[in-house]
Amino acid sequence: MFKKRVNLLVVLSLLLSLGLGVANAAPPAQAELTYTVKLGDNLWTLAEKYLGSGPAYHAIVMATNAKNVEDASFASIADPGLIHPGWKFLIPSPEEAADLMTALREGPKFKVGMVSDVGGIDDASFNENTWKGLEDAARMFGVEAKFLESQAQADYENNITEFAEQGYDLIITVGFLLMDATHKMAREYPDVNFAGVDFSSFDWATTGEVTPNVQGILFNVHEASFPVGYLAAAMADQLDPDDPVVAYIGGMQIPPVEEFIVAYEAGTNYYNEKYGKDVGFTGVYVGDFEAPDQGKVQANSLIDEGADIIMGVGGKTGNGGITAAKERGKWGVGVDVDQYYTLPNEKDILVTSTVKRLDKAVLAVIKNMVVGKFGGGTDYFGTLANAGVGVGPLHDFEDKVPDNIKADVEQIQKDIMTGALWTGWGEEPVALGTEDNPIIWSFVPSGEMERVAAGAEAVADLIYEETGLVIETNVATEYAGVIEALCADPPKAHMASLATFAYVLAADKGCAEAELVSVRYGSPTYNGQLIARADSGIESIADLKGKTFCLVDPLSASGWIIPMLTMRAAGIDPDTDLAELVNAGSHDAVAAAVYSGDCDAGATYVDARTRIEADYPDVMEQVIVFHITIDIPNDGVQYVTGFPRALRDRINAALLKIVETDEGKEALETAYQWNALIERDDTFYDPFRQVLSASGLDIEDLLD
């Protein structure tokens, strides 16, 4: 896995100037690992412990900063001398560290230029936040970053040409108005990479084709502006309950600005619908991004007409509108960045901001460019799901916003992410749970795949009869595929029936939430078992040394995780003491493989042998159980995080009703041997998490 990031880290090596190598006396070979910083740790001693050389701490810095770009839970190390307990590091293997240290000495330096729109680099918003992304890239990746400000639209091509002629590797143009100039100059300089903020790689205006050396940087800002509009309506209702009005000051009337405003108005209307209110909505486009005085004049006119909250969406022009709100005792909403920090004089009247993470998007594009994976001809989309857009903090309004409105805003964001709520921008999506947009329920084969598929489809049909919701079922070949589907953006699965460990992993990644747990043989828990042929001579875990062992799936709790931990506790290291590990793919297959002698021993749930009795009538005599594991929570029904509450409730109620019918019992028995279902949330799995924690193994390590 880490090898795929080596090229990226070649460039990250430029972060540091010391060309120090990794000592030859490294500890025994190890894979990369995730490390959580403890009190008293320092990078030098960590490098000595894991890489065999103190100076190799540079490799830890580079690896961790690279990982941070794709996973913000990892630390961003700006100063190697300042690290904090709780930070998460990625420590490469000694071999990978050596590659990184070589790259540190030999890696090239890339040049990235930014051409701003006429709003200027100091607009406290759009351009300024984009420039921050370049500054972060210079700090983290060692690139040379420079900007040129456009004073007029006539400057666009000249500024782009200046960078191209100076041999810049990537030119980032900022703003929808630079679209035509960018595509034109990209065709004139085909060996230069371009990225355009707020427009696509598709040149719809001129060629009607994708420009191969242009990557678009786009934001689904409507996903964030809708809940902000809802919040603004609620706060206008609080500020002026007799005649509340939400307003905006726009710059130029172009699609990226319209997207803010359309969704902002739709969010206001949604508040009105939910609470039976009549909050008004108004606003004006000034036609300029750099006219704060005009923005202020227009905002004062809106306030005279009753506006209570003003969103400024137009660079310095919009900022002028927020200034007017401050002076007139009204409230405001920022855009693009968290303007609480960029408008210090107005911060106390800012309810929140509709945030576009331009800096993160630019950083990601630069990262990909320097490792030879530039996304020319494609578009990056910032969404709520990938944190590319978002609702900013409430700051001084934290105690002023009612708890029910806070909860509403959170649920609205979840519903937008799952497609259950339309923001008003673009085409209205097809409702989830219909023929054109079915709910996807992913299963894994606990037994024979065709049987599981047939049972799952029968259950889906019964749910349709109860609810009218269309559910499409599938059976994955392994747990990891279902987790990947739940964690995809957008999700490729809305529901799952994961076994314990796989669910815990998905939940801890923030991708799944438990709702129902199955009951088998009167219990919501079960046990794993270790089995062997009766004539194998295997009577205990100690006898497994040198034997071939069948497992169900690397993420199966009873079919591998708990047996593996049990073996380790008994002194058997599965990685070194077993002759071979065989991934059989299902509990039935493990039992059959042990019966036929393809494996000396194996792990299944209790008692998977009964599932193959029809094919192997003497299996209960020929295959013995020599160990029973601890109690393990059963599988059940889980939903992708953010799945609409109303749909969950309908499906849960249907399942609880279906399981009481003869037809339902047969379908659930066929699919997963479920006898009943009970309501349980994520806390049901906490004892299992404690077992994993006590083992000393990181949950991610168990995937390797």
Image: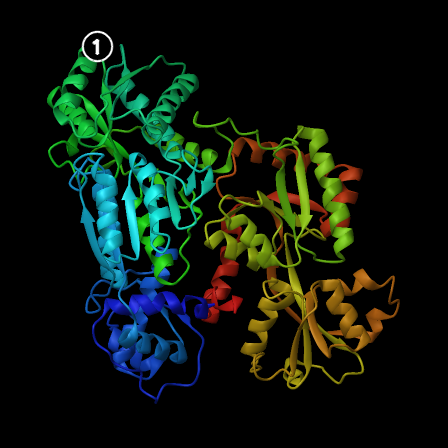
Q: Give the quarter of the image for residue 679.
A: top right
Kind of residue indicated by mark 1: Glu
Q: Give the quarter of the image for residue 249.
A: top left
On the question of residue 36 being in view, the answer is no
In the image, is 263 to the left or to the right of 252?
right
The residue at 31%/44% (across/down) is 357
Image coordinates of residue 368 in percent, x first then y, are 38, 57
Q: Give the quarter of the image for residue 279.
A: top left
In the image, is 583 to the left or to the right of 9?
right
The residue at 70%/56% (across/down) is 445
Instruction: Give 622 or 31, whichever is nearer the viewer.
Output: 31
Q: Is residue 37 above or below residue 536?
A: above
On the question of residue 341 being in view, the answer is yes
Image coordinates of residue 62 in percent, x first then y, are 31, 68
From the image, tell me which residue sits under label 1: 305
Image coordinates of residue 525 in percent, x first then y, are 63, 56
The residue at 70%/51% (across/down) is 522
Instruction: Give 159 or 265, whichever is nearer the viewer.
Output: 159
Q: Is residue 645 above or below residue 684?
A: above
Mark 1, Cα crowd under 10 Å, few <14 / some 14-19 / many 20+, is: few
The residue at 73%/35% (across/down) is 462
Q: Is residue 244 above or below residue 568?
A: above
In the image, is 157 to the left or to the right of 325?
right
Image coordinates of residue 48 in percent, x first then y, are 30, 82
Instruction: Give 525 or 441, whichever is nearer the viewer.
Output: 441
Q: Is residue 81 above or below residue 123?
A: below
Instruction: Give 671 or 107, whichever is nearer the viewer.
Output: 107
* Local secondary structure at mark 1: loop
